[in-house]
Image: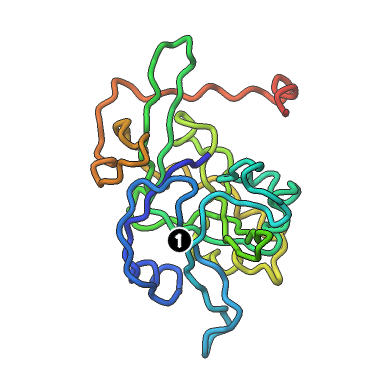
């Protein structure tokens, strides 16, 4: 899953990477949490002059998707992540998967390794960022929820997939990463149906991310400084459990 992430790029950097108009200046954010506003990139309605590519727009939405058919969000769970394997068929996500796919810019994300209670070991936070630096684009879904009084709230969730080998010893899930050469195809909900972009929802290469142990200060939403990403020493990295053979794991499908 992905429960916290960071975005510290400048508007100019984002405009260059995603092909959007440069947005107004905004502060670097080191600890973005659910329900907070996040910057997302959507496909525009028009085409750029002299190009066959659609405009892309950067907009702010609330992190935590609310399907349009929900009557009262207070009675509905906060959907910050959507499983890539089932998003096209789940009632909460299938409309967005077909019609409202987005990109979510990030400098990286945080994940926690949570040992078993029997081990007696505390949870350890990790800062996970692209090994070569720069900005990563998470695959996302967007929905607009309208209240009875007509007011609207744009909301979003991050798509996740099974973790690659590098991240798998920390957590079994990771965000889906869309590469720049696939931005247009992912955002194109006119000609590209969910089955056409299914091959994009795979784990990033094992060497794409660096995994860095950090302090538990990131646990508190009120902590927002760059010190959250400073490395801390850990005696040893957790080791992923070996995957079960298909014959042994059939009963764990649910």
Q: Residue shown at 38%/19% (left/top)?
A: 122
199 or 16, nearer to the observer: 16
The quarter in which the C terminus is drawn is top right
> Which x, y percent locates residue 22?
38, 75
Rendered position, 154 above or below 122: below
Marks counted in the figure total: 1
In the displayed image of the protein, which residue is found farthest to the bottom?
50
Q: Residue shown at 54%/32% (left/top)?
A: 172
User: What residue did someone put label 1 on?
Assistant: 39
What is the quadrant of residue 143 in the picture?
bottom right
Q: Residues within 10 Å of mark 1 (few under 14, many from 20)?
A: some
> Which x, y percent locates residue 19?
45, 74
Q: Is residue 201 left or right of residue 218?
A: right
Q: Is residue 92 left or right of residue 171?
A: right
Dot 1 falls on a residue whose secondary structure is strand
Rendered position, 90 above or below 185: above
In the displayed image of the protein, which residue is found farthest to the front?
149
Q: Residue shown at 50%/72% (left/top)?
A: 57
> Which x, y percent locates residue 248?
70, 19
39 or 150, nearer to the observer: 150
> Which x, y percent locates residue 152?
60, 63
* Colour theme: rainbow
Q: Residue shown at 60%/66% (left/top)?
A: 187
101 or 169, nearer to the observer: 101
């Amino acid at each position: 899953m992905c429960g916290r992430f960071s975005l510290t790029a400048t508007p100019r950097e984002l405009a260059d990477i995603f092909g959007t108009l440069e947005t107004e200046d905004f502060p670097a954010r080191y600890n973005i949490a659910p329900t907070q506003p996040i910057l997302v990139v959507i496909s525009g309605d028009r085409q750029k002059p002299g190009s066959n590519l659609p405009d892309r727009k950067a907009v702010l939405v609330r992190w935590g998707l609310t399907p349009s058919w929900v009557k009262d969000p207070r009675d509905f769970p906060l959907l910050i992540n959507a499983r890539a394997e089932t998003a096209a068929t789940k009632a909460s996500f299938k409309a967005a998967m077909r019609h409202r796919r987005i990109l979510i810019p990030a400098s990286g994300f945080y994940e926690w390794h949570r040992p078993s209670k029997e081990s007696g070991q505390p949870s350890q936070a990790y800062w996970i960022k692209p090994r070569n630096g720069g900005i990563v684009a998470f695959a996302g879904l967007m929905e607009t929820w309208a209240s009875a009084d007509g007011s609207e709230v744009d909301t979003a969730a991050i798509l996740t997939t099974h973790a690659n080998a590098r991240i798998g010893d920390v957590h079994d899930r990771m965000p889906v990463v869309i590469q720049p050469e696939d931005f247009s195809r992912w955002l194109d909900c006119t000609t590209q149906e969910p089955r056409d972009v299914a091959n994009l929802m795979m784990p990033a290469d094992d060497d794409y991310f660096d995994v860095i142990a950090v302090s538990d200060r990131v646990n508190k939403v009120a902590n927002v400084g760059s010190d959250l990403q400073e490395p801390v020493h850990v005696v040893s990295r957790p080791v992923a459990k070996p995957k079960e053979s298909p014959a042994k794991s059939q009963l764990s499908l649910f």
